[in-house]
Amino acid sequence: MYSLRPIVPLLSLMVCLMVAGMVTSVQISAQTNGQAARNPNNIPYDLSLTGITGSLKTRLEGLSILIKDKKSPPRSYGALRARLEQDLKTFEKALRSEGYYNASISHQIDSSQSPVAITMRIFTGKQYKIGLVDLAFPGVRPEENVVEALKAAMTLAPGDPARAEDIVLAETAILSALPQLGYPLARTATRRVVIDHDTDSARITYRFDTGPAMRFGNVRFDGLETIKEGYLRRLVPWESGAPYDQAQVESFRRTLISSRLFGSVRIQFSDPLADLRAHTETIAPEMKITVIETDQRTISLGAGFSTSEGFGGDATWEHRNFFGANERLTLTAKIAEIEQSLVADIRKPNFLRRDQYLTGRVGAIRENTDAFDSLELNIRAGLDRAIGRYWQFGVATDLSFTDVKENDERRTFLLASLPLSATFDNRDSVLDPTYGLYARLAIAPHLAEQSGFFSFYKTAFDASSYLAMDKNKDILLAARVAVGSIIGAENERLPANRRFFSGGGGSVRGFGFQDVGPLAEDGQPLGGRSLFEASFEARFRIGEDFGIVPFIDVGEVTESTTPQFGDLRWGAGLGFRYYTSFAPIRVDIATPINRRPGDNRIQFYISLGQSF
């Protein structure tokens, strides 16, 4: 038996250490049984750790060189012992970092067995706790309210385990809080850890060089060419003279980047940091914001195909700074076998207040489907407001002139509606989400004129969720549900293009476009006043470029105002994905499970992006 425990005086031992170099009192003893073979080609072995369980055992096993290199046995007992000694040192350090400053380790090597049996017995002893935690400021001491805020931000408290990682994380938390409390130049001076073996505790002293207290000074923009400076100044989230807050600076930087107007944004002090550090009094340096404008116009093209909807394509032209204040004008033309449209959208950000958008739309849409033919002219104006990072609420006014031909009967409608919406979206991507939840509720009261006035209310809810089954997100489960209802008017009184339809690549795959739901005697879809849809996918990514997606869809459309779940249509199939740098190319092949007479056995879909 030999001991690594330091010799201490009889009086109370107080050892002052840095966390990175804490001295422990781990005891190590060794015993070897059996005879060593002479010059063996290799020496296979097994390692057993006893005395510990759970996460601590898992951690030591993950650190062990004996376990890591087990498949490459050493060629001599000297090499085997070298591995063992390396593990002993590693375990000693790991036990210290977990707060076990009085642990002991004994080991036994039984060379009479094959493979050689190595046993390590670990006695952790009591886990030391945090005693006192002190904050010291050798230079400028912050005001007491700032000190109290730092203590509240600290992630370490008396009684917590004296783990090295937690001690470092607490320092990081304090250092992250200081720039948000008016001290952007703060840095750590020293970290002092005192171990008291009499009380099995650790006293922590953090010393911070805060630098001078700061307030926001004037703002200067460099690099602007076409963007109005006055617009950007209205976006600045802080007031001149307010205490400096790094969180506001980062928020402003994200706002500028997300506008898609700039390829680069840099926010810094105009004065050199060394000059600022020399101050001891509160200062308000100028903030310099340097930007590089990016191209503000984009042209994009898209195309798709399905056996039920045929070929289709669209072209989009976008200008992201139409009037010089990040107004976004988008012109979209779509040409497909079932739909042709030309739509102009404009979106003005930060209208009257931050995070509020004024929106407008003018469009002409022609639809030629098995259910109806229609031509609609539409104009809309609305307000959207973002609340937090994930919520968005909207209200709009919508006027539409709609000419609909259904069953050889032509009707003309004048529609006024007040669409209301609430959306939650924390997905990591729109075209290829691997995480998050999307949910949207839309309610639209309508007033219609067609041979007299009538009204109806249309409500729709849809949601989708994504769950990765492994850390690389190569296996993903995805689910979607949609529910809708129309009340206030009979099905045949409604404009056909305002009813619910289901079936096709964006709803129930395996069935033709709009073919889920009630059908006329000649097989034409009638649409309905209620909708239910659900989809489930298992997305498997194979390597960097390819993926397969088995899926199942279900849906129902009825003429009643609520889903009845009595005539559900099921479709299933297999999808293939080719992953590009911007979005996956989707190819889905589906078949109806409960096929009706006249339904095709196979449907085929091609598009850009995941199905939902």
Image (tube, helix red, strand yellow):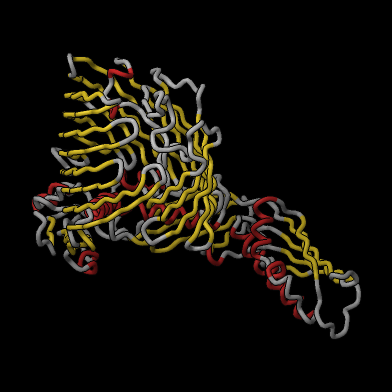
Residue at 22 percent across and 66 percent down: it is: 278
For the C terminus, the image quarter is top left
Q: In the visual, does 550 lie left or right of 531?
A: right
Residue 611: x percent and y percent? Answer: 42, 45
Q: Nearer the viewer, residue 245 or 488?
A: 488
Q: Nearer the viewer, residue 123 or 256?
A: 256
Give the vertical position of 367 relative to 252 (above or below): above
In this view of the protein, can residue 203 be seen by the observer?
no
For the N terminus, the image quarter is bottom right
Q: In the visual, does 88 lie left or right of 220?
A: right
Residue 265 in which image quadrant: bottom left
Q: In the visual, does 56 lie left or right of 144?
A: right
Q: Nearer the viewer, residue 322 or 84?
A: 322
Give the vertical position of 365 relative to 300 (above or below): above
Residue 342 in which image quadrant: top left
Residue that extends furthest to the bottom in the rendered view of this protein:
39
Residue at 86 percent across and 69 percent down: it is: 110
In this view of the protein, can residue 41 be seen by the observer?
yes
Give the vertical position of 9 relative to 167 (above or below): below
Residue 321: x percent and y percent? Answer: 14, 53
Residue 313: x percent and y percent? Answer: 29, 51
Residue at 24 percent across and 32 percent down: it is: 374
